[in-house]
Image: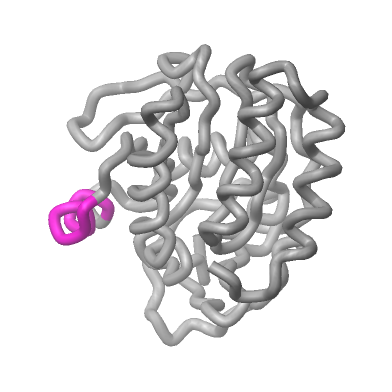
Amino acid sequence: MPGMKRAAAAAGVVVVAGVALAAGYHLSRTDDGAAATQAGPASAGRTVPETRPEFSLADASGQQRSITEWDGRPLLINFWATWCPPCRREIPLLNSLRGRYGPRGYEVIGVAVDFREDVLAYMKETPIEYPILIGEQDGLDAARAFGMETMGFPFTIFTDRLGRIVTVHVGELHASQADAILQAVGEVDAGKLAIEAARIRIRAELAAIPAGDS
């Protein structure tokens, strides 16, 4: 999409105008010098579905994979792109989260909304220790299925083991935020916390975390 490669590192989120999405946009390469559009995580317009939509994308080997392969597990689904600085910064954290929470049944899935050749080249240079799905227009369609009418990268979907969307985090994810969310998801799965109560607690806990706290 024209102007898609836009760095808004200070805000930790790269935003692509929702009008382009509504018009049926496409991917195109642009220069790093493109003007940045900055917005905080709360600014992305969205109507998030209650349950995780189904979608299929090719993985790094070219095999078509359905998100339903991970049914029965709580998921952290991270939408990102190689041209997005906060997306790149998140990768070591996502590797760490998979190592820490994977043994407890969680899975991290990366969805690269980008050109396939760019993603594969990036993965040769950067260790990514969780499954990666790759899509251009079909990746954008998957993002739109989650209600992201104003596209902000990165954004991360947290679901419980039943596939219910507990929360969506728009912008760069930090360790303290991820731990607060995943703790709440674990309590939902254990039957200790109702999902709406979990959403309320997550909002309160994230609001109390100082800006930039990792």
**Residue 125 in which image quadrant:** bottom left
Q: Is residue 85 left or right of residue 2?
A: left
In magenta stretch: residue 11: no
Q: Is residue 116 left or right of residue 71?
A: left
Q: Position of residue 29 (x, y in %)?
A: 37, 66
Residue at (50% x, 77% y) in the render: 7
Q: Position of residue 40 (x, y in %)?
A: 72, 70
**Residue 110 in which image quadrant:** top left
Along the viewing direction, whichever of 145 and 86 lies nearer the viewer: 86
Q: Is residue 164 in view from this perspective?
A: yes
Q: Is residue 150 left or right of residue 12?
A: right
Relative to 193, say whether 38 is above or below: below
Relative to 45, say whether 183 is above or below: above
Q: Is residue 187 left or right of residue 132?
A: right
Residue at (52% x, 57% y) in the render: 175
Along the viewing direction, whichever of 1 and 199 lies nearer the viewer: 199
Q: How many numbered circles does the render carry? A: 0
In magenta stretch: residue 122: yes
Q: Residue furthest left?
A: 124
**Residue 20 in which image quadrant:** bottom right
Q: Is residue 134 in view from this perspective?
A: no
Q: Position of residue 24 (x, y in %)?
A: 61, 46
Along the viewing direction, whichever of 138 and 84 lies nearer the viewer: 84
Q: Position of residue 47 (x, y in %)?
A: 80, 40
What type of secondary structure mainly makes up the magenta span? helix
Relative to 22, say whether 209 is above or below: below
Residue at (38% x, 52% y) in the render: 114
Residue at (36% x, 36% y) in the render: 133
Colour logic? one colour
Q: Residue furthest front?
A: 192
Part of the protein shown in magenta: 119-127
